[in-house]
Image: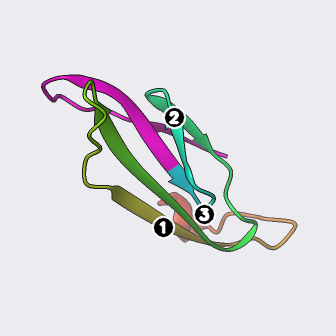
Amino acid sequence: MVRLQLYMQSPNFESFEVNINAHGWKDSGDVVEWKLSPSGISRIEMRTRNQFGVVGKPSHMEVLWNFQAPYTPKPAALGL
């Protein structure tokens, strides 16, 4: 699970919308909990909506996570 904090400073801002893994746009608060696919690419898109219903240009992020149980961090990944 990844927790994202969304921030926007825009005139007439009303809310955020998110689209997770192409499942459609949904209203969102400024904190989004994003469950990653255990093996593969997860994608999230975020955009704003103003008080007049106009939506902004989406931003997106993709994460490739290749989970294999049991996961043990390697010392190099920990900066040790």
Q: Amino acid at mark 3?
A: Asn
Q: Give 25 or 37, whichever is nearer the viewer.
A: 25
Alpha carbon distance from label 3 to label 2: 15 Å
Residue 16's quadrant in the figure? top left
Q: Position of residue 37 (x, y in %)?
A: 71, 64
54 with respect to 5 (left or right):
left
Dot 1, how many residues are within 10 Å of its Cα: few (below 14), some (14-19), or many (20+)? few
Alpha carbon distance from label 3 to label 1: 9 Å
Residue named by callout 1: 62
Residue named by callout 2: 27
Which is more N-terminal, label 1 or label 3?
3
Q: Position of residue 61 (x, y in %)?
A: 42, 62
Which is more N-terminal, label 2 or label 1?
2
Q: Amino acid at mark 2?
A: Asp
What residue lies at 44% left-to-right and 41% top-to-bottom? 17
Mark 3 residue element: loop
Specify the segment rendered in magenta.
Answer: 1-18
